[in-house]
Image (tube, rainbow, N blue to C red):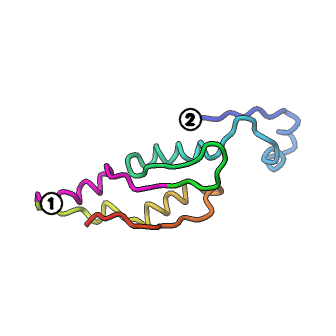
């Protein structure tokens, strides 16, 4: 998913800061953030958002996530790999992907994987 904005040569000559202050028609930062989440962390989250202008994006743990499936293998006596899943690292990655867009990350309920 690429975005190629058109900026007039006059704006480009004025420099990077001036170009940042101009309106970019067709650019939706939330759309690109959600696309990055879906491609960087497939099957980890279910994503909830209002495409018409909410300030909140909700993420819930996907029950089909590989680390949760491994934990469900209790009956087969298979131990989940604790190095494979770390809630803090995953949420930090969400914040890093959304740098400049994400204000806070709240963990309401940690997934059960043990």
Q: Quadrant of the C terminus?
A: bottom left
Label 1 element class = loop
Residue 13 occupies which quadrant of the picture?
Answer: top right
Residue 103 occupies which quadrant of the picture?
Answer: bottom right
Q: Quadrant of the N terminus?
A: top right
In the image, residue 60 sits, relative to residue 23, either above or below, namely below
Q: Nearer the viewer, residue 18 or 91?
A: 91
Q: Nearer the viewer, residue 16 or 94?
A: 94
Marks 2/1: CA–CA distance: 39 Å
Q: Is residue 63 magenta?
A: yes
N-terminal-most mark, 2 or 1? 2
* Crowding at mark 1 (Cα within 10 Å: few <14, some 14-19, many 20+): few
* Crowding at mark 2 (Cα within 10 Å: few <14, some 14-19, many 20+): few
Q: Are marks 2 and 1 in contact (CB under 8 Å)?
A: no
**Residue identifier under label 1:** 78
- Left or right, residue 74 beside residue 108: left
In the image, residue 70 sits, relative to residue 39, either above or below, namely below
Main secondary-structure element of the magenta-colored stretch: helix
- Left or right, residue 35 beside residue 85: right
- Left or right, residue 21 beside residue 48: right
**Residue identifier under label 2:** 1
Q: Position of residue 54 (x, y in %)?
A: 64, 51
Label 2 element class = loop
Q: Position of residue 55 (x, y in %)?
A: 64, 55
Q: For the magenta stretch, what is the residue range?
A: 59-76
């Amino acid at each position: 998913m690429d975005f190629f904005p058109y900026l007039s040569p006059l704006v480009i000559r004025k420099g990077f800061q001036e170009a940042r202050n101009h309106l970019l028609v067709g650019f939706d930062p939330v759309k690109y953030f959600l696309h990055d989440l879906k491609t960087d962390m497939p099957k980890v989250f279910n994503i909830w958002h209002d495409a018409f202008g909410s300030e909140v994006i909700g993420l819930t743990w996907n029950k089909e996530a590989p680390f949760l499936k491994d934990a469900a293998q209790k009956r087969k006596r298979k131990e989940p790999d604790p190095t494979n899943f770390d809630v803090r690292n995953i949420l930090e990655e969400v914040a890093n992907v959304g740098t400049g867009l994400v204000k806070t990350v709240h963990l309401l309920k940690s997934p059960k994987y043990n």
